[in-house]
Image (cartoon, helix red, strand yellow):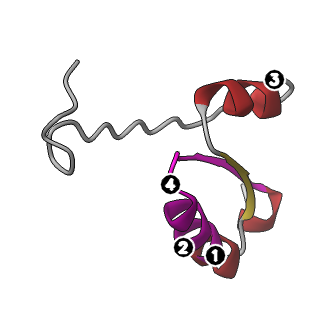
């Protein structure tokens, strides 16, 4: 699979993160679609085949007041 044929759905609630990572992935030749929450991501991914899903959850690292 070539990079130009690969679309990456990038999801984060931080707009700055979406912009920085999206810019770098686009510069590497990928097509990038962004979403700022899970609901938006599901709507955008509804008709797409997912070959790789990476979930990174930062809890209590940046905001010690957040608990699960």
Residue 59 at x, y percent in the picture:
21, 36
56 and 16: which is toward the camera: 16
Among numbered discs 1 and 4, the one appearing first in the sequence: 4
Q: Is residue 36 visible?
A: yes
Secondary structure beneath label 1: helix
Q: Residues within 10 Å of mark 2 (few under 14, many from 20)?
A: few
According to the image, label 3 marks what residue? Answer: 46
Residue 10 at x, y percent in the picture:
61, 49
Q: Residues within 10 Å of mark 4 (few under 14, many from 20)?
A: few
Among numbered discs 4 and 3, the one appearing first in the sequence: 4
**Cβ–Cβ under 8 Å for marks 1 and 2:** yes
According to the image, label 2 marks what residue? Answer: 20
Alpha carbon separation for disc pair 3 and 2: 25 Å
Q: Which label sits in the foreground, 4 or 3?
A: 4
According to the image, label 4 marks what residue? Answer: 14
Read off the magenta span.
Answer: 6-23
Alpha carbon separation for disc pair 1 and 4: 14 Å
Residue at the location (50% across, 54% down)? 14
């Amino acid at each position: 699979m070539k990079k130009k044929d690969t679309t990456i759905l990038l999801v984060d609630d931080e707009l700055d993160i979406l912009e920085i990572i999206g810019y770098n992935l686009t510069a590497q030749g990928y097509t990038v679609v962004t979403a700022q929450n899970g609901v938006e991501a599901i709507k955008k991914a509804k008709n797409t085949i997912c070959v790789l899903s990476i979930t990174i959850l930062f809890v209590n690292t940046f905001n010690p007041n957040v608990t699960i």
